[in-house]
Image: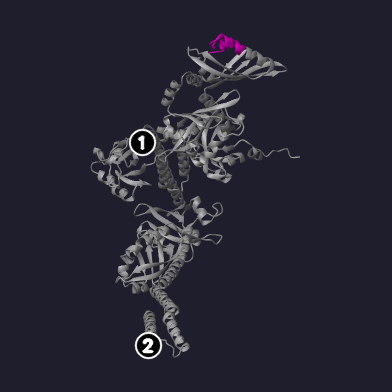
Amino acid sequence: MNDMVDYSIVFRALPTPSIVLRPNAPIFTIVDANDAYLALLTKSREELVGKGFFEVFPSNPYLTDNEWRNSFDAILQEKKNHKIVPQKYALPITTSPTRFDIRYLEIQQTPVLDDCGEIQLIIRSMTDVTESINHAQFLQDTQQLARIGSWEVNMAHQTVIWSQGIREIFEVSPDYQPDFDSGIAFYTHEDDRKKLTLAFEKAMHDGTVFHTTFPITTAKGRTRWIFSVGKADLVNGTCVRIYGTTQDITEKKYQDEALVASEHKFQNLVQTIDGIVWEVDAQTYKTTFISEKVAQILGYTAEDWLADDLFWLNHIVEADREHVARHYYLTEKNQFPANQAFDYRMVKKDGGIVWIKDIVSVTYEGDVPRWFRGIMVDITETKRLADLDRLEKTILELNEQRQIPLAHVLSNYLTGIESLFPGMYCSIHRIQDNRLRTWVAPSLPETYLQTIDNLIVGENTGSCGAAAYLKRPIIVNDIDTDARCTAYKHLALAYDLKACWSYPILDSEGNTLAVLGMYYKQVQSPKPDELAVVDRTTSLLKVIIENRLNADLAHETAAMISQGQELAHFGIWQRELETGKVSWSDTLYDIYGINAKIIAPAFESYLESVHIDDRQQVMDVVRRIQETGEDTVFEERIVCPNGEIRHLRSWVRLIGDSNVPKKMIGASLDITDTKLAEKKLNELYTRLEQHVKEIEASEKKYSDLFHLSPQPMWVYSLETYQFLDVNHAAVILYGFTREEFLSMTIKEIRPPEEIAKIEAAVAYSKQHDQLFTKGVYLHRKKDGKPIHVEIQSNIIQFQGQKAEVVLVNDITEKRNYVTAIETQNSKLQEIAWMQSHVVRAPLARIMGLVDLIQQFPGSVVNYSELLGAIGRAATELDEVIHAITDKAEQINVITH
């Protein structure tokens, strides 16, 4: 049975994150890392093992390298365990490696000593104490914020323990040691002391919880009201301890007494509070009081609020409304919380948004809630700082991604700052050769930035130039009147920029790296909160810019070292000319693929290794060196014992007197990979040339389809309306030459009444990346003649800009023909009506008169009158027929 234990398996399975390091200062090579360590850092074992500790972990933004190095130094010097107190670390989140989580880790470094007492290995383990630290801090902050302290009376030891919060409430010194009697003595009234004693005794007897509210006199003689909650621990019916909390409710108590004492005093007090004081009937939810502070914070009057029962709810930002309503509109009366505070947003009268912290208390009548009372405090600035915290965290995470350009990181940061301060326009100018060079300015006009780019830094070169020159903040409240802006104020005022605050960004050595500029379009002085944010922003920018520049420098240095190592892979040799003795370096043996222990180098064996096609060239080179004594560089090929062919670049020099050289030295660099790369590059270049020719042929084919199309076509810029290309058919249709077209915009072929229509169409197209449209428009030819055209268009990228290709179909004749047909139909309808109505009247009269003559022949009827009537009817009929004939002729004219 094998009792040997594989401790590497045990080490990797340990739950405590640990790595093993070599004591080879200052590198401290990583030997192994267990699974818990890899999981914590979201790294693989291959990323760590074999690399130096500071290479893998170059920096910690919350802990300087010196503290880490001091810990290692202590281990090496003392050869004892060394612990680093819990520190804050930024660790990548497993589900999102580009984002980071802040953790507190306690580092324990343990040396592993050999039999001689020397350090063989260093074990570095980490314990995550984040939850403990956060919990302790949260508890302390919460109690301090709420003015709450805790206490305990140990009945077995007859001791009393007070927390720091209790000591602050009672205003005793840190070394004060309380006991039960001295604690009771702080209570102002004898009756209160008796009540408190009875409460303790009752709790000790049956374990009940007690609540008391009494005034006390502190050690400094001040009167305070305190609210205490206590509970007894009973073991087998015996009280072993009583513990609880005490809260300083002095302020609330005095406010309640003041409210009860005098409504007038209440009103005066309310108006002086920096917040909106309010009261709501807990049964009807009707607002009964609102302070005048509402006008200052929200812009509405108290009367506006009181006139609308739903004013408060309707002016909460819709996204927050449901969350806030849950705190008030509860169905069961016993669900009302006693006291609470919550945050939400409200809409001001001018449309702006303000963050409100609503501090609410409930007043009961018996067991029934009677009043909601509270204060709405404007916490917009506090929220702004919280947003700033989130922004800075995001920017720091973004900056950690080295593939993202620094300018992009800075632009995102400035955009975030601008969102926190509406109306602020930020810029960063870097200092190069003592000049201001525009770096990032996401919201300033590009044309303005061009006018101020490359200005010489100076005391009177505006606020940014002066800040860079003097290395201190320059606040220009009014650009028009500030002497430092006299020479350049016209540049800013042309863009309605009227104030600029500039802060230099200095590196660790005091040199100006860049200048942060903040513009406003109104004369403006910075407020304290703005100055605080600007100072904070400048500090972070210094860290970001300087760290990135240092990182870039480190990257360049690492690249140079890497290149140096590659070039240093020379195989060196020397040959004694008198004795013929040849010696090679180990690297040269590796290059030639020869085992130094088996084969001794010689000039003859070297020549045998040279490729047969290069051997004569090498011999000529050696002979020329011996004849001229000049240094020589040449390329050669060698054949390794395994048949591999390698390309070398070799250097040769003679050493010794000019007349009698003593030795020949040289070095060879394996350039096989370079030669292979050159060969592949040439092959790729040949293929690229063929591909380019195919692309050119394809482009010509599509160009011919455009220019030789029988239908008019053009391409125009969606940004400028300018014609970018036009085919021959369009030139024929419109009468403009190609050159005239390319100097025009599409608006110039539209009549004035069509301009608004085309602008709307273009604006709609600009909102899309792909959009096929079709429509009928009225165009104007060069001679001014209007034509109706059917347009089909699509969005494309042309010459690096967003454009639209347009296909035109002239439908002028088609529309004219349709109009003629419609006119003809109208005339035919008129003829039909005349035939059915106008012709019928005289014809009916003639037929009636003829019938009269036939029925009464030879009667007394006056034939002369009858014939006259028939004649008149016939004349009328003839006129109608002539009118019909005229209209028919008009139809013939229209159709022709």
Residue 35 seen anywhere in this rendered image of the structure: yes
Which region is colored magenta? Answer: 176-197
Q: Residue 705: x and y, percent? A: 42, 72
Nearest the viewer among 127 and 471 is 471
Instruction: Say which quarter of the image contains residue 768.
Output: bottom left
Q: Within 10 Å of the Cα at label 1, are there few (<14), some (14-19), or many (20+) other Cα atoms?
A: few
Q: Is residue 493 magenta?
A: no
Counting labels gives 2
Q: Quadrant of the N terminus?
A: top right
Q: Residue 465: x and y, percent? A: 29, 41
Position above or below: 869 against 529: below
Position above or below: 218 against 795: above
- Point out the residue furthest to the front here: 860
Position above or below: 686 against 842: above
Q: Amino acid at mark 1?
A: Glu
Q: Amino acid at mark 2?
A: Ser
Nearest the viewer among 70 and 170 is 170
Q: Residue 275: x and y, percent? A: 44, 29
Nearest the viewer among 876 and 150 is 876
Q: Is residue 566 left or right of residue 725?
A: right
Disc 2 secondary structure class: helix
Q: Which residue is mark 2?
A: 864
> Can you tell which of label 1 and label 2 is closer to the viewer?
2
Disc 1 secondary structure class: loop
The label on residue 509 is: 1
Nearest the viewer among 855 and 189 is 855
Q: Earlier in the sequence, mark 1 or mark 2?
A: 1
